[in-house]
Image: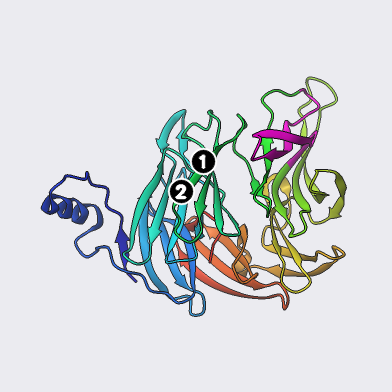
Amino acid sequence: MFKICRAKTPLLMSLALALTLLLQACGSSTSPHPISVADPLYVLSADGNNLDLQVIDRETFHIGGTIAITQVDSHALPGAAVAPGTGNAVIVTHTGVVDNGQLTLQPETDICSMGNGVCQQVLRNAGSATIDVIGNRVAVPVWSGDATSAGQLAWFSRSSLSLEERVNLGAFPPGAMHVSLDGNTLYWLTQKTTYGPSDAGYELLKYNLSTHQVERSVSFGLKVPGELAITPDGSIYVSITTVIVPGANAATPPQYIPGTTVEKFSSDLTHVGDLAVGKSPDHLAISSIGIGSLAVSYAANQGGGAANVVDIFALSDLVRMGTITTTDDSSVTYLSVLSDGSIGLVAQKAPTQSAIGILNPVTLQVTWHFVSGSVIAPIAG
């Protein structure tokens, strides 16, 4: 295994000085180097004070190479995401970090080439914790460091990973979101700027990317959603992690009880029904292989669910097909859908102990592998 450092040097800096700074930043034993993995998985992890991109062979779990993206504070990690193009490069994006009112890490979006082991910044002070691959394009919703200004949806070519356009979004805070398969609509979990005592402030938006208008919104009242996922036919699933029960009077604090449903909506945000699940459903992933399946993981906060399990439901009738349990009872922190339709799992045992898994949603067999550092994003590949 080797680590590749990303150099940031002025254009006109002499080659000798650039090399000196590169060696000082990375250590004399490291240098940019091609990474060759036939069937790679991409894993973003925080190891010590570095945010690293690990490139791992899907079959053997051998680490083919590591690229250092940026320096981070291990106690205040950003949200992040990674998505491969059709060529030999990936998009890596991360949010900013605000600690005690101060921006300690600027958001950023980079293109990282496996051909030379180098990342190039394409969006400065603009990053995200979400990426969508939509046909021949990659969508990255980005915000600035303080996330107070309106966001943008950055569209990249999937083949070249060149930036094609940036679409302005409304002045809503960042949240879980997905683009429809036709690329015309953004479904967005966000918070209202003002709301009353009988409302937790969360809503689901249907945002038209052509007109830049919210076509419809659905309020969740006193329910707190976790994540959303979209099926190939356009149905939308939203996990309800927590339900707030107001106090009987002003002197009585509210209660926070675990949610036990995943709500289903049609593409126009009509509520279709509720799927009964375990306590505090959190992350969702939808695979279209086989009969199609919905994976649900759980949060352990607020006396919630069993965070060490993932339930698999058939999309056709929403009957539970089976339950996956993590190794060493570690907590599932991310779900994702890989290019072959398998489901990527991330489980966290301790701040420096993570495991990644590949779940076959047809056979319900899962292969686990331990990785160094804290994995801070869904795996991709």
Q: Verify whether residue 101 appears in magenta.
A: no
Measure the alpha-carbon separation of dots 2 and 1: 8 Å
Q: Determine which quarter of the picture holds residue 276.
A: bottom right
Circle 1 SS class: strand
Instruction: Give the residue pinned by disc 2.
Output: 163
**303 vs 98, nearest the viewer:** 98
272 relative to 338 in the view: left or right:
right
Circle 2 SS class: strand
**Can residue 167 be seen at all in this image of the molecule?**
yes
Write the residue at 82% across / 50% down: 264
Q: Determine which quarter of the picture holds residue 189.
A: top right
Q: Amino acid at mark 1?
A: Arg
263 relative to 81 in the view: left or right:
right
**Please, is residue 47 above or below residue 174 in the view?**
below
**Can residue 279 be seen at all in this image of the molecule?**
no
114 relative to 324 in the view: left or right:
left
Q: How many residues crowd mark 1 within 10 Å: few (<14), some (14–19), many (20+)?
A: some
Instruction: Give the residue pinned by disc 1.
Output: 166
274 relative to 137 in the view: left or right:
right
Answer yes or no: do the residues labelled 2 and 1 have beta carbons within 8 Å?
yes
**Please, is residue 126 above or below residue 60 in the view?**
above
Q: Verify whether residue 220 appears in magenta.
A: yes
Q: Residue 102 at x, y = what percent?
A: 43, 29
Q: Which residues are magenta?
A: 196-224
Q: Determine which quarter of the picture holds residue 135.
A: bottom right
**38 vs 285, nearest the viewer:** 38
Q: Residue 224 at x, y = what percent?
A: 74, 40
Q: Residue 320 at x, y = what percent?
A: 82, 66
